[in-house]
Amino acid sequence: MKPTMPVADQHRLLSDSAVASFDGHLARAGLPPLTAGPTRVFQVNVGKLCNQRCHHCHVDAGPHQVEANMAWPTFEACLAVIRELKPTTVDITGGAPELNPHFRRFVAALRALDVPEIIDRCNLTVLMIPAQSGLASFLAEHRVRIVASLPAVNPSQTDAQRGDGVFARSIAAMRVLNDLGYGRPDSGLVLTLMSNPVGAFLPSGQSSAEARFRALLQTRHGVGFNDLIELTNMPISRFLEFLERSGNTAAYLAKLSGAFNPAAAAGLMCRDTLSVGWDGTLYDCDFNQMLEMPVSVEGSRTIFTYRRDIMDERPVRTAKHCLGCTAGQGSGCAGKTAS
């Protein structure tokens, strides 16, 4: 299997781009450099192991990532910090986070702590693996919000990005979730879909995309969901490799730069999110994690050495990939950031 582009090469490509720095964009808009406030969203990447290997994946996840899995002592350290911070949301991501052997134990521990919202970033097809029998019922029992990735309502587009047969298995998984109450009005079980463009262009618009997905999925496949969020493809990892292969790196970065929206900066996830890597390293966001850019505070760079007194109001580390979060409607793990 071809290895993903080394992180050093990704940084070089981004820094060599002719577009101005992210901080430069902020300054020209009269905005100060980014700083982090109190942590509202505690995001945990529990590993890069996944049953899929998607072409756009910024995590470089896949079946080959068997060693990159969070160990239980790191989960315990996360739980200790969660008890201290009392975040409104714990966002569990991967890879396919459910493939971590401690996933269900962690979710149960979070529910015991009365965390208001627990999110599972699910690729849907993992629910159909025979070894994961009962997973969907477990998520429903613990009232976990599922944020499920589905790039398109066109089967060929989804399969081209994620693998042959993924769309059909995703629809089958949605039927299982609907039968449990997910995506149904007043059930309290929330199914959010997350889509991303299938090429080197920006999302079409979250509201219009949600209406289109809702109509076509119900009409063609009889499945429903609660809401949809759109994520801009970030120029890192496998998507950056795609841009390089297709000769689109400079044009895509110029597109992000030209679409810079100052209004999107106010809602950036790095302002209230703390991202924990599978090895316990701390980051301002999931994207910085993949570029190996830990938080700026040297005395609190792992979950084992976390210090709240020096983490709040820390400077956020930025680079040109951050332009993906402020282009057009804005983009983040919760969807668009511009009101």
Image (cartoon, grey):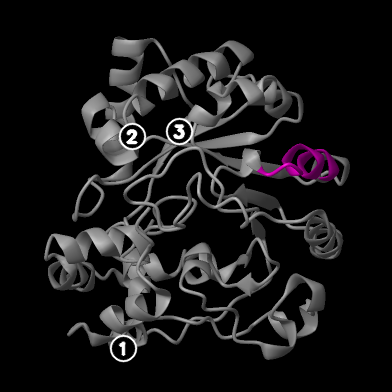
Label 2: which residue?
A: 163
Distance between mark 2 and mark 3 Cα atoms: 24 Å
In the image, what residue type sits under mark 2?
A: Gly
Decide: is 239 above or below 230. below
Left-right relation of 168 to 274: left
Label 3: which residue?
A: 227
Foreground residue among 260 and 238: 238
Give coordinates of residue 283: x percent, y percent. 59, 72
What is the magenta range? Answer: 100-109
Element marked by disc 3: strand
Decide: is 251 above or below 186. below
Name which quarter of the figure residue 219 lies in.
top left
Magenta region's main secondary structure?
Answer: helix
Q: Check contact, mark 1 vs mark 2: CB within 8 A.
A: no
Q: Check contact, mark 1 vs mark 3: CB within 8 A.
A: no
Give yes or no for residue 59 being in the magenta stretch. no
Distance between mark 1 and mark 2 Cα atoms: 39 Å
| Residue depicted at 26% across the width and 71% down the height | 260
Distance between mark 1 and mark 3 Cα atoms: 34 Å
Decide: is 93 above or below 251. above
Q: Decide: few, some or many residues near mark 2? Use Cα within 10 Å; few <14, some 14-19, many ≥20.
A: some
